[in-house]
């Protein structure tokens, strides 16, 4: 697992060294997300938020040119709110640019995934939100854990949303009761909307 806080040369070295292995990059922020663009063909997974995904897709040129209309989203995106439809289009562009799986954080809306096995949105658990600090990190850690377990995209998204929801329901940035069993139990309650 890598994050865009690392220097560009470190990210490039790590991505090249672990080419073909499960490797997740968390883009961290809009300012640091562009570091991920040249690495897309080397990454198995990337976890941007909506804005970071749109920025990376725009760097892809013709592949990533974002249309302002929902009609451009095509199959699987019909009926989505505009911001989710644009997130789906961005995720598709990042896949076309070479990344195997894209997991786009939709904030309170959940986590959109796009991979060879399909596309969908995992919706958050109905838990009280007390503190969102650390939720993205918890989601990234769960994605990495799911990759180590060789889970499919949907299962990874379930785990990530369960981890983020548990984290957000805690007053601290880490949920004290978040262990593998609790995470698996909560992952079963994550609502999935398949897009394709």
Image (cartoon, grey):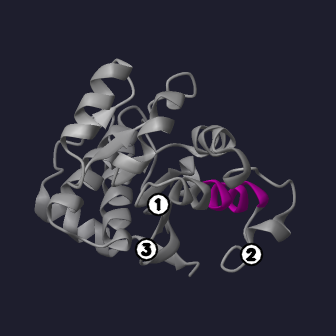
The residue range painted magenta reads: 82-90
Q: Mark 2 highlights which residue?
A: 74
Neighbor class of circle 1 (other Cα within 10 Å; few <14, some 14-19, many 20+) is many
Neighbor class of circle 2 (other Cα within 10 Å; few <14, some 14-19, many 20+) is few
Q: Mark 1 and mark 3: span between their CA atoms?
A: 23 Å
Q: Mark 1 and mark 2: span between their CA atoms?
A: 25 Å
Question: Which residue extends farthest top?
Answer: 7
Q: Residue at x 75, y 63 (%)?
A: 81
Q: Mark 3 highlights which residue?
A: 116
Q: Earlier in the sequence, mark 1 or mark 2?
A: 2
1 and 3 marks in contact (CB < 8 Å)? no
Q: Mark 3 and mark 2: span between their CA atoms?
A: 17 Å
Is residue 183 visible in this depiction of the protein?
yes
For the residue labelled by badge 2, is the local secondary structure a helix, a strand or a loop?
Answer: loop
Which image quarter holds the C terminus? bottom right
Most foreground residue, 78 or 33:
33
Total marks placed: 3
Q: Is residue 108 left or right of residue 150?
A: right
Q: Earlier in the sequence, mark 1 or mark 3?
A: 3
Q: Earlier in the sequence, mark 3 or mark 2?
A: 2
- Mark toward the viewer: 1 or 2: 2
Q: Mark 1 highlights which residue?
A: 124
């Amino acid at each position: 697992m890598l994050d865009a806080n690392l220097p560009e040369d470190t990210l490039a070295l790590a991505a090249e060294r672990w080419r073909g292995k499960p490797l997740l990059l968390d883009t961290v922020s809009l300012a640091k997300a562009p570091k991920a663009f040249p690495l897309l063909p080397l990454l198995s997974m990337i976890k941007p938020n909506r804005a970071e995904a749109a920025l990376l897709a725009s760097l892809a040129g013709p592949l990533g040119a974002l249309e302002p209309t929902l009609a451009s989203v095509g199959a699987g995106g019909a009926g989505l709110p505009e911001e989710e439809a644009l997130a789906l289009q961005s995720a598709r562009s990042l896949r076309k640019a070479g990344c195997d799986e894209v997991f786009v954080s939709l904030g309170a809306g959940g986590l959109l995934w796009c991979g060879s096995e399909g596309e969908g949105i995992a919706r958050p658990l109905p838990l009280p939100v007390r503190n969102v600090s650390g939720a993205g990190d918890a989601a990234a850690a769960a994605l990495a854990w799911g990759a180590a377990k060789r889970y499919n995209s949907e299962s990874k998204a379930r785990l990530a949303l369960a981890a983020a929801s548990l984290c957000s329901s805690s007053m601290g940035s880490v949920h004290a009761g978040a262990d593998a069993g609790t995470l698996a139990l909560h992952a079963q309650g994550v609502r999935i909307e398949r897009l394709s």
